[in-house]
Amino acid sequence: MRRMVVDEVVAQRDGHLVRGVLEMCVLATLAAAPTHAYDVVDRLRSRGFGSIGYGTVYPLVTRLRKQGLVVQESEPSPAGPPRKVLRVTTAGEAALRDWRDRWAATSAAAERVLAELDGTP
Amino acid sequence: MSRTSGGSAGWHPRLTAWVDRVEGRWRALGVAEAERVRWRRDLVVDLAQARLDGAALGEVLAVDPVRFADDVATAQAPYDMEVARRPAPPRQVSPQRAFVMLAFAGALVGGLLSLLTVYPVGLTLMDAFADSYAQEGLIALTLHVLAGLLAATGGAVFVGFGHRDSGSSRRLALTAGGGLLAAGALAVGPAVAIARASGYSTQASTMTLEVLVVVAICAAVMHAVARLAAR
């Protein structure tokens, strides 16, 4: 019973951590290569976000589209009809740069706090 | 094939059923049809492309369509999910209508009280003391005036109680009482005219007509009074 509670707490903590960065990671994934939401899921998983699914990424992409950071476009396909893909807009690129700067500052601050455990300044 | 499947190579009927459930949830949330159609089209385009690129069907179908629909609707700001989830607020009765309804309810209670008290006593008095047609008429008139006063008092009490939290409850109560008396006085003429025209018939149809005319006149007067009171 106690084990289940601990697992739940850990899962919640993981969820908070991922939620904080997922939007930035989805945007970064699409900035690297325009694709559809399902492929974003695959790519994020292959980079270590094992718990991410379509049910998480599609609503997130929807919000990014609503904010004008991502648009859905047709892309020529070598085999068959044009592919429908999500592409990062200029505003999305600017938002990604901003996120990245903030992430760097936040993670650096966290690293400094954690470094105190090791006795290093 | 439904309008969403479009016969795409990688599409599967079970995906159509899943999208149907998502759209059904949007409908239940009160999302307008034009938006639903647009959201559904976008979702189908993405899913169809995913399937063409080899996405596993089972993984999409494993997503809870209700939660998914909620999350997408939440993402579609300024669409407010909390508002959609909230039960519809009860219809508000306009202050004027509330005034009229309270006045009528009070008048009804007052009228019933007069039927139970004033009329039996009055009829007993009439039998005991009225020696002439004129005396009977005087007692009958007194009875009706008392009944009217009781009904108007009932209306005033109800309106006053209904507006007890308002600073103008006393004024509204007096207005309602006065309005009911005026309405009753106005209704007497047409009611008596109908009674006279029918030879003072006590048939149900005639009585119903008289009651309807009185109620209609009182309603019209009280609506006018309510408008004046609201100023």
Image: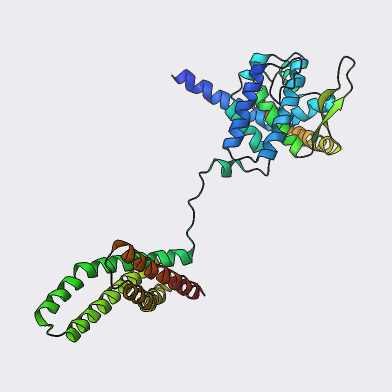
Image colouring: rainbow
At x 69%, y 27%, the residue is A57
Residue B164 seen by the camera: no
At x 85%, y 27%, the residue is A74
**B109 left or right, relative to B228:** left
Residue B24 seen by the camera: yes
Between B178 and B184, the one nearer to me in the picture: B184
Q: Residue furthest left?
A: B128
Residue A65 % position (x, y): 76, 35
Q: Quadrant of residue A64?
A: top right
Residue A78 % position (x, y): 90, 16
**A16 left or right, relative to B230:** right
At x 43%, y 71%, the residue is B222
Residue A6 % position (x, y): 51, 22
At x 71%, y 28%, the residue is B43
**B125 left or right, relative to B38:** left
Q: Quadrant of residue B103?
A: bottom left
Residue A46 % position (x, y): 74, 16
**A120 left or right, relative to B28:** right
Between A41 and B201, the one nearer to me in the picture: B201
Between A53 and B24, the one nearer to me in the picture: B24
Q: Quadrant of residue A84?
A: top right
Between A108 and B20, the one nearer to me in the picture: B20
Quadrant that contains the N terminus of chain A: top left
